Every structure is written in structure tokens, then in C-alpha cells.
Image (cartoon, helix red, strand yellow):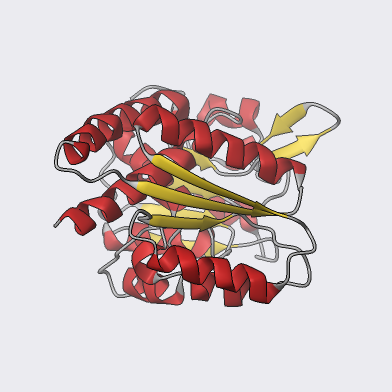
Amino acid sequence: MDKIIDGKAIAENIRGEIAVAVEGLKSRGVTPGLAVVLVGEDPASQVYVSMKKKACAAAGIFSDEHKLPAETTEAQLLALIDELNRDERIDGILVQLPLPKQINESKVLEAISPKKDVDGFHPYNVGRLVTGNPLFRPCTPYGVMKMIEHTGLDLTGKEVVVVGRSNIVGKPVALMCLSQHATVTICHSRTKDLAAQVAKADVLIAAVGQPEMIKGRWIKPGAVVIDVGVNRVGEKKLVGDVEFDAALERAGAITPVPGGVGPMTIAMLLYNTLESARRRAG
């Protein structure tokens, strides 16, 4: 396997396949549609929304963008979501997080129709993931699984250690690895002797959100390392949750930051939107 897992290249291939499939759907009179809702002017969120819009355009997916002021009320946002749930042109709804403090994120995510929940955050879709019958898989964990698949590694019986227990990455990616017959350990920032847990991992998935918290010397020789973390150090430098240079010497394969998991998240968002459109097309 390649030492560096090039998320950008893998995502590009997936997006190319999506574009071909979208053209096939359009020939049947169905254009996949993704609604993206941004509340407020968080700079990082604006960048993400712009990237998603460009990715939709490149894949031939209809992008319906809604930019709302920061003072938008919860009731106004819920009314928009209700409208999008009923809009037949829309196959996926994405509400960009974080939301302003006057809006309950859980309430908003639960208002999205599970059939259009391309982020995979609705409790219905989380429940289906837990029971092994997912409708939509969350985009970042789904991208992680595609990267592991790209290495050619069979997870059956392998020791997978996930560092991070968030609902967005840690928990769902652990469930996905379990579904592929791995033995999974979930760790976090308060795990005792984290180094010993990491050292046993055939596959390490780091998603704890702390810059270079996982030291390269902890990595089991030959392990696959997927670093989901993106942490800003200083004004310009981005680093992951894993000490990259030292880990590179020991790992069998490792994702870089940036250029690793990040591009995969948007690719899998497009894939989920395509899948939703396919269901609409029957």
C-alpha cells in the first residue's frame, strides 16, 4: 500500500464517479438537489459552504443555498427546514454547524426529514447505523472507511482504536468498523495510559481535536493511521491529532493534514445526496 493515503486523490475519483451517475439520473429526468443552510457569518462555515457549492456544481448536483442572518430565530429556521422537507427538488438538507446560541442544534437536526438527512445526524439514522441497517452514514466517518478500504486492508479481526467519542466522528466510525468485524476500542482525552491503547492498534483513527496529542512513538509498526483532526497552530500551520513526522516513520500508511480526511467529507456528502436522489427516482 502507499505510505501516504492521498485523500484528495481518492475523493477526486469518487466525485468523478458521482458526476457520471448524476448524468445518468438526469437522463431519466431526475436532478439531485442539495439544500445548504448557513445561519450567521462564521468564517470557517462560510468557507465550507463555498466548497460544498463548488463541489455540487462540478458533480452536476443542484445546489440550493440559504444564507440567513445571525439573529434568525429558531422558529424561522424550523419553518425553512419544513419548507425544504416538502420541496420535491431537494434530496438532501445540510444545516451548517455551529448555529447561533439562540437556536437549539438538536431540535434543528431532528426537524430534518430522515430521508433527506445526508449528514446522517438524525436520531433515526443514528439508530439505523447502530442496528446495522444504515440509510445515511455520516460523511466524515464514511470517508474514513473509504480510505481504509483504499489501503486494501481487511478489518476482520483487526484491532481498531478510535481516539475520540463525538457523535459526529468517534462513535459512528467505531460502529462502522464493528460492522466490518473489527475489534474496536474507543478512547478519549481522559483514557488512562492512552499510549498503551494506541500501541495495540492495527488501525488508529484519531478524532480527539487536540494538536499532535498522539505521539509517533506510540504507533504500532505497520499500522494504518487515519488522522481526522485539523488543528490550527500559530497563524497558518495546520496539524492533525497525530504527531505526523514521527508517526510516518512507524506507520504502514497514514493520512496527511491537510489533504487527508477533509476532501473525503465533501465527497461522501455528494454521494449521500446521489443515493437519496436514486431512491426518489425509484
Where residue 252 appears, as percent x and y from the top left, is 42, 30
Q: Residue at x 64, y 57 (%)?
A: 97
Q: Residue at x 32, y 26 (%)?
A: 13
Q: Quadrant of residue 123?
A: bottom left
Whether residue 185 can be seen here: yes
Whether residue 212 can be seen here: no
- Work out which quarter of the rendered image holds the N terminus and state it: top left
Where residue 118 appears, as percent x and y from the top left, is 41, 57
Where residue 200 appears, as percent x and y from the top left, is 47, 51
Question: 106 or 61, which lies in front?
Answer: 61
- Work out which quarter of the rendered image holds the C terminus and state it: bottom left
Q: Is residue 70 left or right of residue 187?
A: right
Question: 221 or 161, which lies in front?
Answer: 161
Picture layout, residue 40 above or below residue 184: above
Q: Residue at x 32, y 46 (%)?
A: 32
Question: 105 or 75, which lies in front?
Answer: 75
Q: Quadrant of residue 74?
A: bottom right
Q: Residue at x 42, y 54 (%)?
A: 160
Q: Is residue 245 left or right of residue 100?
A: left
Q: Quadrant of residue 6?
A: top left
Q: Is residue 7 left or right of residue 37?
A: left
Q: How many marks?
A: 0
Where residue 203 appears, as percent x and y from the top left, is 43, 46
Question: 96 or 84, which lies in front?
Answer: 84
